[in-house]
Image: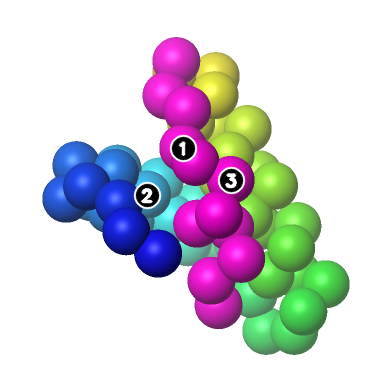
Amino acid sequence: LEHSLTTELVWLAAHGFLHLLGWDHLDEKSWQQMLKQQLFLLHAVGITIEKQITLEN
């Protein structure tokens, strides 16, 4: 997957923020739940990430 450095940094910042709030992804189900929450968080602040990035684990 090709995406910009900005996209990667925003994605990692949101992911790290969720970890600081107590989210974790120890199994596939919790991984998918966290990704949904991450996309929701980014969308809430007006950032759209291409869907393909959510397929990475």
Residue pictured at 75% horizontal, 70% vertical: 30
**Residue 15: image tag:** none
Could you give the CA–CA distance between mark 2 and mark 1, rounded to whole angstroms? 8 Å
Q: Is residue 26 left or right of residue 19?
A: right
Q: Residues within 10 Å of mark 3 (few under 14, many from 20)?
A: few
Q: Could you say where residue 20 lies in the image, as x and y percent from the top left?
A: 43, 57
Compute the Cα span from label 3 to label 1: 6 Å
Q: Is residue 27 above or below residue 14?
A: below
* Residue 51, label in figure: 3
Per the image, the residue denoted by label 1 is 49
Under mark 3, the amino acid is Lys
For label 2, the residue is 11
Q: Are marks 3 and 1 in contact (CB under 8 Å)?
A: yes
Numbered circles on residues, count? 3
Where is 1 relative to 36, above or below?
below
Task: Give the farthest residue toward the left.
Answer: 5
| Callout 1 amino acid | Ile
The secondary element bearing badge 3 is classed as: helix
Residue drawn where x is 75% and y is 84% of the image: 27
Mark 2 vs 1, N-terminal side: 2
The magenta stretch is 46-57
Mark toward the viewer: 2 or 1: 1
Q: Amino acid at mark 2?
A: Trp
Please name the residue shown 54% across and 32% down the image. 41
- Residue at coordinates 16% horizontally, 50% vertically from top-left? 5
